Image: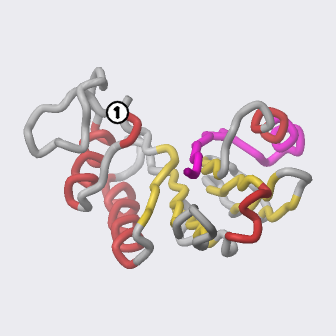
């Protein structure tokens, strides 16, 4: 089993934010942490005692923190767009091949065209990736409320309310036959 988490960093530009992230991650059990809103000025690729840190530079930025126990099983992190990154884990022992997409969706303050472009890109990368196990994690700026129709099988009834981004994420999950994991507890 692979434990995958997500963390909206708000910024990892200052070194103090990087140090805080590394201190916090040592308190949890994880294999991969998807990082969003990193806002690094330069790409980051660092190897520490117990983790690997890889990511992009941009005013938005995404990245991953990978437990060093998986270091021999990963391909380099790929920046697909300023809001979408991809990490591929190779099959090793009982761990199957897995692709993790780290994403940071535009908020509802952005033009509809930018939101639509994000989802078009994400769907393209998701569909062209032929790994059997795929995880999309990150910050969708979405609120997904309770299930409203039988088509919304990907949603369990634990959500409270919907927003526009939640509607868009729901459409994506239906179109791609995926599951919204944050509503599954």
Q: Nearer the viewer, residue 171 or 91?
A: 91
- Name the secondary structure under disc 1: helix
Extreme residue in the left direction? 150
- Callout count: 1
Relative to 20, say whether 99 is above or below. Answer: below
Query: In screen coordinates, is 91 left or right of 76?
Result: left
Q: Quadrant of residue 140?
A: top left
Q: Quadrant of residue 71?
A: bottom right
Q: Percent x, y for residue 7?
A: 62, 40
Query: In screen coordinates, is 42 left or right of 90?
Result: right
Q: Nearer the viewer, residue 8 or 109?
A: 8
Residue 11 shown in magenta = yes
Residue 71 shown in magenta = no
Q: Which residue: 57% across, 62% down?
A: 94
How is colour applied across the structure in the image? secondary structure
Q: Percent x, y for residue 179?
A: 31, 48
Q: Residues within 10 Å of mark 1 (few under 14, many from 20)?
A: some
The residue indicated by pointer 1 is 183
Q: Percent x, y for residue 136?
A: 45, 55
Query: In screen coordinates, is 155 left or right of 34?
Result: left
Q: Which residue: 35% across, 60% down?
A: 119
Relative to 26, say whether 123 is above or below. Answer: below
Q: Which residue: 44% across, 62% down?
A: 134
Give the quadrant of the C terminus. top left
Read off the magenta span. Answer: 1-20
Extreme residue in the top direction? 160
């Amino acid at each position: 089993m692979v434990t995958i988490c997500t963390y909206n960093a708000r910024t990892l530009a200052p070194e103090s934010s990087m140090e805080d992230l590394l201190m916090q991650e040592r308190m949890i059990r994880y294999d991969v942490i998807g990082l969003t809103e990193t806002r690094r000025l330069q790409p980051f690729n660092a190897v520490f005692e117990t983790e690997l840190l890889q990511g992009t530079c941009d005013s938005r930025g995404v990245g991953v923190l990978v437990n060093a126990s998986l270091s021999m099983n990963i391909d380099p992190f790929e920046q697909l767009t300023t809001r979408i990154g991809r990490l591929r884990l190779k099959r090793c022992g009982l761990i199957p091949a897995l692709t993790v997409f780290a994403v940071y969706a535009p908020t509802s303050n952005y033009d509809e065209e930018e939101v639509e472009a994000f989802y078009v890109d994400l769907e393209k990368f998701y569909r062209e990736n032929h790994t059997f196990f795929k995880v999309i994690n990150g910050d969708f700026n979405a609120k997904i409320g309770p299930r409203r129709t039988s088509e919304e099988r990907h949603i369990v009834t634990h959500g409270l309310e919907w927003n526009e981004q939640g509607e868009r994420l729901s459409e994506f999950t239906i179109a791609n036959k995926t599951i919204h994991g944050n509503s599954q507890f």
